[in-house]
Structures are given as C-alpha cells and as structure tokens.
Amino acid sequence: MKENSLHSIMNADSIAFLGASNNPFTMGTTQIAHLIRGGFEGKVWPVNPREKTVLGVTAYQRVADLPEVPDLAVLVLPTRIVPEILDECGRKGIKRAVIISGGFKERGEEGGKLEEELKSVAKRHGIRFVGPNCIGVINAQRNLNLTFYPYVNGPGPMGILSQSGTYVTQVLPYLAKRGIRYSRAISLGNEADIDLVDGIEYLSEDPETKAIALYIEGIRRGREFVEITKGASMRKPIVAYYVGGTEAGARSGLSHTGAMGGNDIVHDGTFRQCGIVRAPTIELLYDWAWALATTPIPRGRRVAIVSHSGGPVTSMADACARNDIEVPLLSENTQEKIAPMVPETGSTANPVDMTFNTNPGALTDSIPRAIFESGEVDAILIHGIGGSDLIKTMKTEAPDLVPAYISDIERQMVKMHHGLVELRKEMSCPVVASSFDDHTDAAVSYVMKNDIPVYPSPERAAQAMAALMRYADWRKARGNYPS
Amino acid sequence: MKENSLHSIMNADSIAFLGASNNPFTMGTTQIAHLIRGGFEGKVWPVNPREKTVLGVTAYQRVADLPEVPDLAVLVLPTRIVPEILDECGRKGIKRAVIISGGFKERGEEGGKLEEELKSVAKRHGIRFVGPNCIGVINAQRNLNLTFYPYVNGPGPMGILSQSGTYVTQVLPYLAKRGIRYSRAISLGNEADIDLVDGIEYLSEDPETKAIALYIEGIRRGREFVEITKGASMRKPIVAYYVGGTEAGARSGLSHTGAMGGNDIVHDGTFRQCGIVRAPTIELLYDWAWALATTPIPRGRRVAIVSHSGGPVTSMADACARNDIEVPLLSENTQEKIAPMVPETGSTANPVDMTFNTNPGALTDSIPRAIFESGEVDAILIHGIGGSDLIKTMKTEAPDLVPAYISDIERQMVKMHHGLVELRKEMSCPVVASSFDDHTDAAVSYVMKNDIPVYPSPERAAQAMAALMRYADWRKARGNYPS
C-alpha cells in the first residue's frame, strides 16, 4: 500500500514557514506563533526576505538558504507568488506542503488558471500538498498547529476532516467547552491535490483516531469516496455533515471552495450504503462523532433511561421513540432490585425516575449497574450528571445550608460518579449522558474525561445513542460486529 | 373578565411557608433560603411546630398564629398531612397556595383519592392553588423564587410554563450561560386546580412576558386550550415542546405527573391551528421562545446571510433552504455597495462571505446595514459575533502579537458590535446571530443583552429565524401582522 502523504505532513519534524513576519496583523505571523509557542517540539524555520528573525527565531531569506531540507513547507503568501515559491521549495527538495493562501479556483477563471499552475509545479517536483485556500492542519498529539487559532483542547480520539476552515478553528473553543477532544483536524481547502478521499484514508489508518467527523460541501471523486469509506467504516465509524444538497447550500459552497454540491437524496443514499452516519447539523456532527469515538457500540437497541428528573426522562423516552430506540419495561425481578433506591413517588418501570429528593449516589452507581447486569438492556441513557456547581452556588448563597461534611465539594461530587465510570469500564457498558450542568462542573468534567459523553440536553443524548446504534446496525448487517 | 389567580400568586407580598426548618437536608429549607436571601422584598413567615426561628426568621407554630392573613401559602409537607394543613390555611383566610408536596395522583389510586380530598378542601375555602407535585414558581422581576434552585439569571422577557419541574429549575444554569432571561417560570405539577390553560392565560396577560415557552406532556382541557391559545397567539407568540405523543413518552409522562399524552399528529395539527410554534426539543423550545421574545417579526421570508466564515454561511444557507427561508441574490447595486468591504476571495452575492482576513468591523456594522437598507431582505442572519475571548487568549499566549492599540480588549470588541445593535434598534431589523464563542465573550454577551439572540451554531440561528417566520405567517394569514 502506498503511504498516504498526510502521514508525513502530520508527522513533520522540521517545518519551513513562508509568510510569517514580525507584523502581528498578518495571518502568517499568528500561525507561526502557535507553532513556535504551542509546544511543538520539531524545528521551525521562518523564511522571509526582509527579516533576520521572526518572533525571535532565526529567519532565512530564501528557501534555498535553509540549513536542511525540511519535511514540510507552509505557505501563507500573496496568491500571485505562490506557484513561484512552491517551485523554490521543490528545487530545495521539499516534498510536502500546506498552502494556506486563497485566491485560486474559488475566485473563478483566473484563479483557476493559477491553481492549475500550482498543480503542475507540485507535480514536477513530486510535492504532495494540502490546500490552497485552507486554514491549515492540527496534529493534537504533537502540538503541531498550523492554523491561526490557539490550540485549546487536550488531544483526544476524534478526527476532524473539513471542507471549511472554520470547523477546525473558530469551533475549537466550542469543542473545548464541551469536553470534546480530537486527534487530527484537517482543513482541506480547494483540494487541488490532497482531497477528501485522501483525508478519509489517512484518518482511517491513524491509530490515534477512533472516529471520523467529516464536513462536506461537495464530493469530487465519487467512486473512490464510496470505495474508501466502505472499507474505512468496517474499521472505524464515520459521521458526515453534508450541506451541498440544497440550492442555497450549493451556491454558497461554490464560492467558498469551488466545490459543487449535488442532489441531497443521492448523497443520503451513498452515505447509508457506505456505513456513514449522516448528521443534520454541525453540533450533531461533533456530538455523534464524539459518542462514536468514546463509547462501546451497543449490542442491540434496548436502553434503560435513568434520571432524577421526570421531564428529562420523558423527553428522552420521546426522543428514543422517534429514533427507533426501544425503552423496554424492566422485569419484575429487576424492578424489585432497584425499588429500595427509588422512592414511592418515583418510577422503576423504565424510564426509571428516582425523583430528586433521595440518595443521589444511586443514580450514578447502583441503579444503572443493577439494570445493566440484568441483561435486559444494551445501553444506559442517564440524565442528571453533575451537581457540584449547584452546591458551590449554594455554599456562596447560603453556607449554613450546605452540610458540614460537604467540605471538598468537587472531590465528593466526583466520587459520587465513580460508580458510573467503573460500570462503563468494567462491563464495556455503553453509557450516554446529559446534563444542564456543563464542563465547569467538576463531576461533569470527570465523567467526560472518562469516556462517557455528556450532552446539554436529554434529546441530544438520545440522538447520540441512536447514532451509535445506526453504525452498529451497518456493521452487524455485514457480519462485522465491533468487538 | 375574572382575574387569573396566578396574578395574585406571582405578586404575593406576604408568604406563609410550611415545611421549612433549619435542617439543610430538606427541600423546604432550601426553598425558603432562596426566598429569604434571594432579594425578595415581601414578608416571609415560616410555619413550623418545632422551631422558634427558621434561618433566623421568626417562625410560627401554626397557621392560626400568623400575625396577618398572608397572600400565599407554600406547602412542602409530607403527603398525608397536606389536606389537613391546607384546611388550616383556609380557616385562616388564605386564598392562594403553591403545593410542592408529591405523592398524589401520580402515585395511583390511593394518591388520587388524597388529591380529590385536597381539591375539596380548596374548593370549600375558595383556595386556588398550583400543584401538587410541582417544583414551585418564580417571578424573576420580583426575586420571588419558590423553587429549591438558586435563581441565577437576571429578569427577562420569556415566560416559562412547564409540566416538568426540571425545566424551571435544573435548566436555570443552562439558560443563564446562554444569556436567556425569563419573566416567570411556573411548574404546574399535577394541575389539580390551576392548570396549563390557566397558566397560558396568565402569561398572555402578563406585561413582562413577551413570548411563552410551554413544556407539555399532556393537555387536559382540550377545547379551552384551543380557545385560549388561539386568542393568546394573536397577542404574543407561544412555542410548545410536546412529548406525550409517542408510546414511551406517554408512559413516562403518566408516572411523572399523572397526565396522559395522546396522538402526536393530532397535537401537531392543534398547535398549528392555534398559532403555536412547535419545537422538537427542549433546547429549541428555549431557543425559539427567546428569539420570539426579543426579535421583531420579519415582514417576509427573505434573509441575507453574512459572515466571515465560509463553512458557517454554507451551513446557514443549507439550513435556510430546509426551513423555507429565502436567501435571494442581492441586486448588483447592493453588491456594489458592499463590495469595498469584501475582499476578492470573498463573496457579495448572498450569502455574503467577507472571509476572515479583513476589516472585521464591517461584518457587524456597515455590511448588514447596507443590505437591510436596500429593502431586498426582511431579516439578517449573521455568524461570527464575538472575538474578545480569542484576543484574550492570544494576549496570554503571545502578547507581542496583539497590537498595542488593543489595550482594553473587551471594551473595544464591544464597540465593534455597536453598529449591529443600532441597526437592530433604529430600523427594527430582525437580526439573529450565531457564534462558536459564548456568554464568556464580552461582545457576545453585549449583543445578547441588546436583544439580538446569539446561538451556538449557524443552523440553530437559521432554525430560530424560521420560528419567527412561522409565527409571522400565522399572524399574517389572520390579517393581524405584528406592529
């Protein structure tokens, strides 16, 4: 098998950076700053005809002056000179590039010609490149960040491949606040060389990536897309958000990356055929890819819903019904087992509503464990993770109301959630949670770090569970049930 | 017109509280704490047979001992004694109550009998009450908070009426973090007396409430529901999230509040007939009610999409197409007007993508203004509010990259968004925004405070815009276009 060229781009140890200066107003300067100061341990060589140093790092006047042949060149230059500088890179012996500069195919005929020129220069030198008109790439495990955005998350198991730069940059704080961590983030830009299909192949081979999130405006190599994704889906889940299927979406995408979208229903069928779970919005793309990257695949469609809140369990049950998830009545035997932990005003039937005013620890420990051990369900949906932020607020507002034994709120609330994390680990129990508390809550954050996704609403938890099941069904139908 | 009894409950100046003690473990104690310490300026009289004071406030042994007849009694007592104590309240002359205690109709036959007893006691004394089995009510404008949750938001224009207590308590931090503020929050519980229909009538009359958010598990008085909502919808928008329509949802709701849900399609038709915008999830319920509470109703279905990000504008355009929102091509004249603010690599056609590397102030000022003034669109969708959190992160990570003139980041970023707020105010321009930055960002927070809703994704902004248009269509069809 030919090595996918993204491997060497993502693992570059030395990077020539063209287009950074000491002028803080330029994108190039911002980008090199993240590379130099973001913890990347490889070499970074700024190339700039007018600066001796860039942000304190020795700069070289020309590519030819570089002390060694770098593994990768990054180009953030005015459109017109990009082909010429890429040629210099080629003459130096550089084989990989990320071309951030825009102004090519997405700008119509003239830009298209420049893009052809770029391609022929690359071909002549055997250069494989990402872009042009992209925002860069991130290898989170190596702190290799070529984008203009500060890298704010810790590394994680979700791979992002996007035909929009925004969905690998501006979205980073959004993901960080939801505890969603990624392995690789790749902005494809115009795909003049390395394209969507290459990106999927790369991520499907990358051991750090457990599930792939795709943002798609248009697919260029249809046949290869089907071939690659069908194979990749047998190994790891792919979630796709496709927006080229409507007239307005297609028009917008055309001016964005020069890609032409097409018939929505056709794409829908293609995705289904290839085992790709299609997400209808950007939020659900990340939600579902995160669930698929972290959570064991359920063996069937039966879930137990547990909570201390009647409204959310009803919302969850309703969302399950709308997503073909079964919420079976629990057996009398199992109901008897959990009954001592559920007050009279609650319900043990499934949904299990233990109501708010009782031993809260049972919700995140003995109740889900007893239910999952019964073998009557394949997965657990739970609403009401958290609580440490509430107690902290209470402690400020009415300290005399917080019992004295609650001294170290965060530690104690985290401890209360140990049982759930153990259940998830010991029994490979698929657990998907929701809470109106978020990442600022110590318990929510603890649970999320331990591979239990926590969503901001009961319906989004149910929808993520449905995504897990949709993928499981596809694998099952091919006799390839995930181990 | 008979006065709706919720008016006097929500405006109570003196409240007898039955079931609070100095034991921090009880819900009643937590509830009275929020009332006493949360800024409520009326009188609070704890009634407790065993305590001289409750949280430092003089307590009375019996209801009969109270110095005056309070406007309202709140009961958080063991189920069995609730009818008896309500009778004592009646004998004292109390006419309004909120009964938090559960264990009634939702607990089956025996509980049902107790609930009948409760109703007959109330009827005998002419007491109107909310509950039982509710979580309390909040009048945000008066800091009157009868729930066990700390009140975390400032008062605002959205009224919440819910058949689940969670959606007026646990959800409060969620709403606060999204800048969503409310006027009233009412947990209906079992609706033994005051019910959904009464609540809608009350909120439709309440001058502080500009739009109504309903969480519904089941409708008891169908005919009155239709009558009241049809009339109310002519004055202010109603958004409903109904979860009783599926078998699992109905089963869950039954054990939750004793309400029986019914056929989903029938309810869908009823809502449409009554001008109620139906939301499919709890997040969209609040999203849409917030948009309808803050944003002028668009005069038609034509929007301009503006952003500095290609991906989000394409997502927005796609979501518009799926929600019957028109994204018309702008006239050459208008495109010429905005062209100087959009670089060559961007697009002026609509969606307007000004790309990231240019004068960012135009996005939130001159571009939307020029477009709206053209009269070619009825509303503006904008992605990319914010930015102050990014610059703050940059300033920490690479201070030399942040230009010296950016000294007071938050103030300067807020100023950059003045133009949008002015456009919204001066021209009553319907503006709905999205951003991957959130409430922690000074600019996002400023815009939200000025009645421009900011959602966490482009699709949710488009969906909220669609909700505005759906309501507008209903009013227009009745010749009652909102002024």
Image (cartoon, coloured by chain):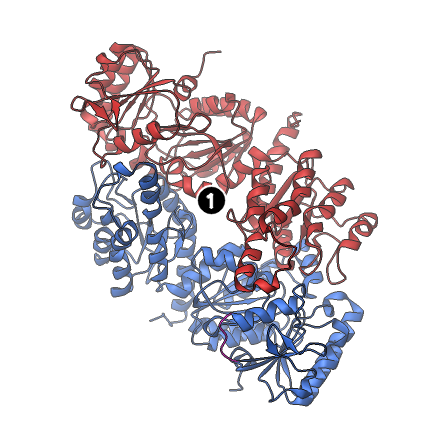
Chain colours: A red, B blue
| Left or right, B220 with reference to A15 | right
Q: Is residue B91 above or below residue B183?
A: below
Residue sitting nearer the eye, B332 or A430: A430
Q: Main secondary structure of the magenta part?
A: loop
User: Magenta residues?
Assistant: B38-42
**Residue ID for mark 1:** A177
Q: Indicate the position of residue A165 as horizontal and vertical percent values.
A: 35, 35
Asked if one can make out residue B216 in the rendered structure from this viewpoint, the answer is no
Q: Residues within 10 Å of mark 1 (few under 14, many from 20)?
A: some
- As drawn, A402 above or below B342: below
Left or right position of B208 against A449: left
Where is residue A355? Give x, y as percent: 68, 59
Q: Quadrant of residue B353?
A: top left
Residue at image coords 32%, 34%: A148
Label tally: 1
- Residue A125 to residue B477: above or below: above
Q: Position of residue A317 (x, y in %)?
A: 65, 52
Q: Quadrant of residue A257?
A: top left
- Judge from the rendering whether residue B148 lies leftward or rightward of residue A4; answer left or right: right
Does the segment drawn in magenta span residue B224? no
The residue lying at 68 percent from left, 38 percent from top is: A422
Chain bearing tag 1 is A
Secondary structure of the residue carrying tag 1 is helix
Q: Amino acid at mark 1?
A: Lys
Q: Is residue B155 visible?
A: yes
Q: Position of residue B138 (x, y in %)?
A: 53, 70
Q: Quadrant of the C terminus of chain B?
A: bottom left
Q: Nearer the viewer, residue B8 or A81?
A: B8
Image quarter of residue B82: bottom right
